[in-house]
Image: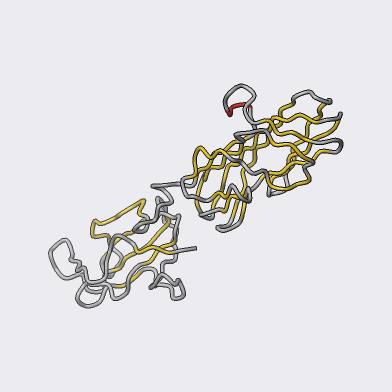
Amino acid sequence: MPAYLAPVFSVGAQFFTNQGVILAGGKIFVYQAGTTTPVTTWTSPAQTVANTNPLVLDSAGRLTTPIWVAAGAQYKFVLTDSTGASVGMTLDNISGINDATYTNPPAFSACLSTDYSGSAAYTPIKFQEVNLDNRSAYSAATGLYTVPVTGTYLVTVNVNFVTSASSFVLLNSSVKQYAKAASTAAASAFLAHTHVAQYAANSTISASMSVNAGTLTLVSKPDGGPTRGTSMNIALLSAS
């Protein structure tokens, strides 16, 4: 997971007590946003060396190491004197510089623009019409959505389909949760699948189909719009 430089408490900035005295030995506590749960920060974007928590100011009231924070997370910073008494500076809900997780959260919506026919056997559906892809994470060539940020995602897949024979159709997501529907030959049927799951950054999300008899046609827009057509929607609920 990438790291970003914290926008507060920069190296070189000097801090003072409420009486204007240099804050020698002052402390900066770092917590999860809105809590008092300590979290790890790092001295560099490589995230190989952790800062102490609290970080301790030198005799001139300055930090000697930078603060790098994880992508997709928000933090609370509390400044105290050397005894741990607050000096009135608490900064909450802070994310790293240029971390677009919250300003541009992962979100994706796509549908078929034309019908797709064939004998499906759990190969990813390739959605041609992308309506939203905030992080450019989807490949129409492969049908795979590459997760940009570790977190909990809501995934919804809707499929309008027709089979050439009476059959059962299975919809499969990349977390192996299934939905199932029966169809008679040449009769249109609709299948929907929704799940909430934890995905790691760089893992993939996709949807695929399988039919136990005949061939399968995925219908794009039976009503002139994607509402009841074949589509997939993905949204980040919370980063972790």
Q: How is the image coloured?
A: secondary structure
Q: Is residue 44 above or below residue 19?
A: below
Q: Identify the residue at horizontal 71%, vertical 28% (top origin).
A: 190
Q: Identify the residue at horizontal 43%, vertical 56% (top origin).
A: 32
**Furthest-bottom residue in this view:** 59
Nearer to me, 108 or 72 = 108
User: Could you tell me how many numbered marks the image carries?
Assistant: 0
Report the side of 119 relative to 69 (left or right): right
Nearer to me, 172 or 223 = 223
The picture quadrant where one finds residue 150 is: bottom right
**Furthest-left residue in this view:** 20
The picture quadrant where one finds residue 45 is: bottom left
Q: Identify the residue at horizontal 55%, vertical 57% (top origin).
A: 201
Q: Is residue 209 above or below residue 33?
A: above
* Residue 132 on image: x %, y %: 49, 40
* Residue 170 on image: x %, y %: 78, 38
* Residue 220 on image: x %, y %: 64, 31
* Residue 178 on image: x %, y %: 74, 41
The picture quadrant where one finds residue 42 is: bottom left
Report the side of 41 relative to 125 (left or right): left
Nearer to me, 53 or 124 = 124
Report the side of 29 relative to 175 (left or right): left
Q: Is residue 56 above or below residue 86?
A: below
